[in-house]
Amino acid sequence: MVGDVNSTLGAALCAVKLNIPVAHVEAGLRSFDRTMPEEINRIITDTVSDLLFAPSADAVENLAREGIEGERVHLVGNVMIDSLDSLRSSAERSPILNVLGLRKKEYLMATLHRPANVDADSTLELVVDVLAAAAQIMPLLLIAHPRTKKRLLESRMLTRLEQSGAQVIEPLGYIDFLALMSGSLVVLTDSGGMQEETTVLGIPCLTLRDRTERPITVDEGTNEIVGLDRDRVESAVQKIAAAPARQPRRPLLWDGHAAERIVAILQGRYK
């Protein structure tokens, strides 16, 4: 099982009840915020799994604190970076920036999809305030998750966002998405995966949440937790725009070979 979505937990529970061994990729990540549905999914999936493949040392430590350690736990690195590395050259050939009329390092990229940010009008209004303020500093591209686009339409906030100068587009395939992320000056997001990808790309990331289950991207990467504080976001964007480019970072074992390590462990365990 991979990740922390509802289908991850559902499949894990079905498998364990059928006595089918369960291996969890991205095990041990914790935001320590149990109001997040994903946090509950992570904790339960890790508890019932036979093998836990952790992406970073802090994830191994989280599991140990919960009494999960020993031969069940393996530090393997980050499979998302495997995908990024394998498709990076394809992304460099993507024409998507030209299609959208964008120039490298002259736009901001945003994505949002977390229920806590978009489901309630009160928080969605804060999101729109933050994005609209950022769009006044530099052109902003919002790649709108279907959940987010639906809520923007229902709340009648989409027009307000577009009037601020933000460009709102439909979801894209990963190669074009990676090209846009790589070309942006700053990424604004509530996505855990993008916090990891921007670290390796060297792209400053402003996480529009109060906590993250990927603290390694703050400690060793390019990520800054800003919540939905408009002043903090404005200040951060202006500071980044005036600063030298950040250097890519590769936390331990984020080397593009995590999947190979996982396969080797599985082959050794289930010959």
Image: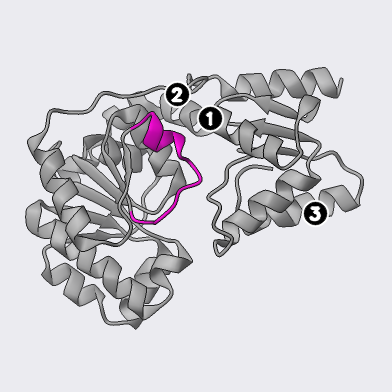
Is residue 213 inside the magenta stretch? Answer: yes
Q: Are marks 2 and 1 in contact (CB under 8 Å)?
A: yes
Q: Are marks 3 and 2 in contact (CB under 8 Å)?
A: no
Point out residue 229 in the picture as x, y percentages from the top left corner: 26, 61
Kindly identify the amino acid type of the residue bearing the numbered disc 3.
Leu
Q: Which residue is mark 2?
A: 251
Point out residue 143 in the picture as x, y percentages from the top left corner: 31, 56
Kindly identify the amino acid type of the residue bearing the numbered disc 1.
Asn
* Mark 3 element type: helix
The residue that appears at 77% across and 24% down in the rendered structure is 266
The residue that appears at 32% across and 82% down in the rendered structure is 155
* Mark 2 element type: loop
Q: Which residue is mark 3?
A: 13
The range drawn in magenta is 208-221
In this picture, is 125 found above or below 99? below
* Mark 1 element type: loop
Q: CA distance from mark 1 to mark 3?
A: 24 Å
Question: What number is the disc on residue 78?
Answer: 1
Res 200 seen here: yes
